[in-house]
Amino acid sequence: KIFDLKFSPFCSDLLASASEDCTVKLWKIPEEGLKEDITNDAQTYTGHKRKVSLVAFNPLAADVIASSSVDYSIQVWNMIKSEVYSLCKIHGAPTSLDWNENGSLIGATDSDKKITVFDPRANKEIFTHVVTDGRGQKFVWTGNDTFAYTGISKKNEREFKHFDIRKIENNELCRVKIDEQVSLLTPYFDHESKLLYTVGKGEANVNVFDFNEPTPCRCLNFSTGNPASTFCMIDRRNVNYNKNEVDRMAKWNVFNEIMYVSFYVLRREVKYEPSLYPHLPIYDPAMTYEEWTSGENKPQIKKEITEFENKFITRDDKFIKKEIKKDELTPGEKYKKLQDKLIELEQGIQ
């Protein structure tokens, strides 16, 4: 059984899978796509002692990947040699796993309602903190030192909390109530637009929160139609920037159909607006494995969204408002012309 799947941020045909047989496997997808089942993996990691539930590629460094397991550990390892580089113990079964923005720290939440932040290069635990007094769920980094955590409070309110790891002992930066539903909430954070998306398993609703202000606020809450089994974010480098689309999600609904949910900024003119699209990371890593293990931190290499190959863009002229021809008839003139035509046809019938 497969518990988690992740594509490499640098190689769109490299897929990692975490499974019940205690392994993490890397799979190479053919350039022409899947024409038959793939049974031979490109690499296998066997460092865990119990089933592996989560996997995450480092967002900046090449050949660095992390995995977590119900053996209560986070393991960071070398993809090329399949050798463990560093290991950290957690306090329960992992529920989420994520790297911070510059790939220097990795964090995991567990069934014990705790978050553990681990520095893999120093091979030491930074801290462990209880983040909720209710039912714990999942977290996602919103920067290098901040993260958002979704859970259910003692009052059975679904909520997210925003934390700064430098001020973690002083409680959360803010708490936002979402609703009073009972299903698990999964957070997705877009580091470029600074938007947090939360979706619930078996639901159709998507909540969007804006982190561009000092205090995050809800900016959207809508239904996507049929309930979904799961969602996932599409790479922002593939949005239709000529239509003011800022993000897109893939939705797998309860009828086993894949559908797309697009998020647009409403503007009077539908065209490419550079202010909506900050530069995006390129597909090449910012650091080699050796540079990362030596302790270097390098910024992501970025370029404009228009410089990426994109199969989803649409030509501007499709959205240009059609100009009304000066000799075009008004509705009243069209009606009179149709009346005359009707009289002419009736006379012909007689």
Image: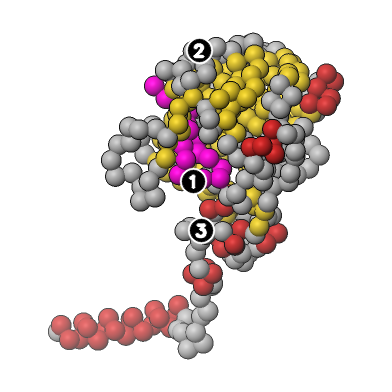
Q: Which residue is mark 3?
A: 310
Q: Is residue 10 magenta?
A: yes
Mark 2 vs mark 3, CA separation in Å: 42 Å
Badge nearest the viewer, 1 or 3: 1
Residue at 60% in and 16% down: 73
Are there few (<14), some (14-19), or many (20+) residues within 10 Å of tag 3? some
Give x and y (percent) for residue 241. Answer: 58, 59
Q: Earlier in the sequence, mark 1 or mark 2?
A: 1
Badge nearest the viewer, 1 or 2: 2
Q: Earlier in the sequence, mark 1 or mark 3?
A: 1
Q: Quadrant of residue 136?
A: top right
Q: Is residue 13 visible?
A: yes
Q: Which residue is mark 1?
A: 12
Are there few (<14), some (14-19), or many (20+) residues within 10 Å of tag 2? some
Q: Is residue 12 toward the left or the right of residue 133 in the image?
A: left
Contact, mark 2 vs mark 3 (Cβ under 8 Å): no
Report helix, strand or loop for mark 1: loop
Give x and y (percent) for residue 317. Answer: 51, 72
Q: Earlier in the sequence, mark 2 or mark 3?
A: 2
Report helix, strand or loop for mark 3: loop
Q: Which residues are magenta?
A: 1-16
Amino acid type of the residue that numbered disc 2 sits on in the rendered structure: Lys
Q: Which residue is mark 2?
A: 49
Amino acid type of the residue that numbered disc 3 sits on in the rendered structure: Asn
Amino acid type of the residue that numbered disc 1 sits on in the rendered structure: Ser
Residue at 62% in and 45% down: 285
Mark 1 vs mark 2, CA separation in Å: 29 Å
